[in-house]
Image (cartoon, coloured by chain):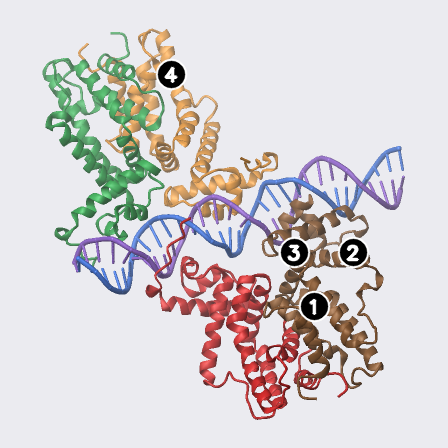
Chain colours: A brown, B red, C green, D orange, E blue, F purple
Amino acid sequence: MVSKPAPDATRRSERSRRAIYAAALALVGEVGYPKTTVEAIAARAGVGKQTIYRWWSSKADVLLEAFLDLAGQSAQAVGQEADAVPDTGDLAADLKAVLRATVDELFDPRFEVPARALAAEGVVNEQLGREVVAKLLEPQLQLYVARLRSAQDAGAVRADVDPRIALELFVSPLAQRWLQRSGPVSYAYTDTLVEYALHGIAPR
Amino acid sequence: MVSKPAPDATRRSERSRRAIYAAALALVGEVGYPKTTVEAIAARAGVGKQTIYRWWSSKADVLLEAFLDLAGQSAQAVGQEADAVPDTGDLAADLKAVLRATVDELFDPRFEVPARALAAEGVVNEQLGREVVAKLLEPQLQLYVARLRSAQDAGAVRADVDPRIALELFVSPLAQRWLQRSGPVSYAYTDTLVEYALHGIAPR
Amino acid sequence: MVSKPAPDATRRSERSRRAIYAAALALVGEVGYPKTTVEAIAARAGVGKQTIYRWWSSKADVLLEAFLDLAGQSAQAVGQEADAVPDTGDLAADLKAVLRATVDELFDPRFEVPARALAAEGVVNEQLGREVVAKLLEPQLQLYVARLRSAQDAGAVRADVDPRIALELFVSPLAQRWLQRSGPVSYAYTDTLVEYALHGIAPR
Amino acid sequence: MVSKPAPDATRRSERSRRAIYAAALALVGEVGYPKTTVEAIAARAGVGKQTIYRWWSSKADVLLEAFLDLAGQSAQAVGQEADAVPDTGDLAADLKAVLRATVDELFDPRFEVPARALAAEGVVNEQLGREVVAKLLEPQLQLYVARLRSAQDAGAVRADVDPRIALELFVSPLAQRWLQRSGPVSYAYTDTLVEYALHGIAPR
DNA sequence: CCTTAAACGAGACGGTACGTCCAGTCTTGCC
DNA sequence: GGCAAGACTGGACGTACCGTCTCGTTTAAGG
């Protein structure tokens, strides 16, 4: 059995690719993910439907790449070091600062709608979910891992603590409140998370 | 603007309602949420489509009620006290036990597929999301709040800690790993979460 | 096998019957026959749907009875002799006069829409068609038969002519032009039909 | 107001068009016009419903074109001269022959059911009715007009007679008896119509 | 520079499901 | 028991998109 010959990526139209990203992000922002259709993306991008199906396997796939592209651009715009957790020596202060910045980002409408859409699709579509985690979520989390390891070296975190788990104490609650709208999100809230995570809730 | 007159709920067919719940849950389990269609639910339930649209506004709405019904039945089956966090006096042990039971439940296929579907839909559909949180998630979380308050009375948790936030230290990481498949879920993992949450990750 | 027991006609609601006739005629006039639904007739008449299905077998049946009722009332209103072809002794003049009156009636909107609807339904639905012919069309045609027989007695029509066929020479062309819109309908046209029918189109 | 852009007729699928004609005629013959649904035509033709709605505005429209196509094919099959009224010089004989052939055709089941359906729909739907008359009925009637004009030239019909009206004396009665089932149709009947029409019913 | 084959825009196609409308039946409670 | 009301199963409606499949038309590489 012969599979369809893979298209020749060298001849791919860059103009179309960018137009599709833009159209996909715009439509998701305007009408929401479920009402965004491949047909509409093609029409808005001035592109044939086949050009989308030639290079992507699904609407979710298009959006994932479009979002990664957007994230990549933003990162470049801010500067190469922007995506690291700061390390001033004061772990609590550093974590609080980053979480506050994250709160702001989570509610930036340019990010919120497509990010929610991808998260939702990933919950139900395992393949996409793993891609989202691997390409979008995990790289972010590794920045916390690095900061926590540095804190362990400095003696600010116990050596027997697993940083990959430890970071979830403050990251996951924030993620859940945002995704599921299960509670209010504020700087006070993220500050509290950092305090509880560092010192525990039991009496010292 | 005239709205459609509300149907008379006293004349509603109980037989149809139950058949629709059963069909919806069965189909979601068999083919997944996105491929579950209102048409298929109606056919499987031996019901006219209009009967579904008369009482529910969407596929997600049907599934939410079906799931609540299922959860209600399960609770009844196990007994009235089943839904409380145990209180043996040993907070760490109690929390670990409950989280271990939750892990089992999360991977019980009868619950997993519809629960994921509702969570995913809730992420993207605010109205449904709020219903899911209010009817499904928050009641569960309040059980932890109660246990933590009891622990505060017993001096096992500091008095200045907000229990509603504290519980997220161990519940949200588990929820996120399950929902987003962002890491392995095991008894060891949940035990660790409880330890970290109680005593913090900083040196004591 | 037992058939459904016939409803007890003595207990039938006269008020409902009349309301249904009125609603049916009104709706056919307003939205046309195909868009007239049993449900709408019931709603407009303030009647349950079952009351219609109890006494009539179809929408067409309702309309036929409603139309017969309307025709009966009109006849009564005009007087008992109104429905005969006049007999002044001048056959040509009498026929022309009746046809001119018929032209007026055919384009009276109170009659036109329901009459067309019944005719159309009768073309395709044999059972109804036979009822329409027997109850509506044939009685009218028999009035021409009577007039033509009288003309035969007076020597104005040949004795070997079949009046039931002869009348069709002027009635059917008019009927067809009206029903099928296959040509203009005017007094001049009907007058011409009478002339041609009486004296033929061949040289005398 | 923006109208939907017209589809590109040059890219239309001939295979689908023919399959739709065949399916429509077959279904109308088998289950009758009212029970023929667009859905069933599409299914039987192996075609998506949208392909029907793309090119036709209604079930009646499909049937009209299918019937015209059928009539066109029949005409071709019989030969180019088949659709003219014969002209042997004997007007009465020619008309009788053509009417007898028409009688046979009217009761040929391949023609009868769709023809009735179109006639019925045309009675109630003015737009379709005018199309039926213009494309189906009037061309046939013009053949009679031609024959009658030839008869006028030969002195067999009075010069002051309007052929377009004269033909209705024998055509319309036949049409009405067939359409409305208002009387028996036989060769004797049509022969009689021709006699009456040529020489009138009054004494000569 | 010119061929030529792939990618492209456009959009028709066979399908599936949508959410609505009605048909005809059934049930409930009033008169 | 007829009635108004209206919920029920069933099924067709006409629409919106899916993902596939031609159509010409660019367009860029290699001859």
| Amino acid under disc 1 | Arg
In the rendered view, tell whether residue B172 sits above or below residue D179.
below
Residue D169 locus on image (x, y percent): 28, 19
Query: Can residue D1 be seen at all in this image of the molecule?
Result: yes
- In what element is the residue under mark 2? helix
Indicate which disc residue A73 carries: 2
Residue closest to the far bottom: B89
Q: Nearer the viewer, residue C31 or D189?
A: C31
C-alpha span from label 3 to label 1: 16 Å
Q: Is residue D141 left or right of residue F25?
A: left
- In what element is the residue under mark 1? helix
- Would you name the residue on which mark 3 appears? A59
Q: Quadrant of residue A101?
A: bottom right
Chain of the residue under label 1: A
Indicate which disc residue D145 carries: 4
| Closer to the eye: label 2 or 3 | 2
C-alpha span from label 2 to label 4: 79 Å
- Would you name the residue on which mark 1 appears? A130
Residue at left offset 61%, top offset 90%: B155
| Amino acid under disc 4 | Val
Residue at left offset 22%, top offset 21%: C101
In the rendered view, tell whether residue D164 sits above or below residue D8.
above
| Closer to the eye: label 2 or 1 | 2
C-alpha span from label 2 to label 1: 22 Å
Q: Is residue B110 left or right of residue C148?
A: right
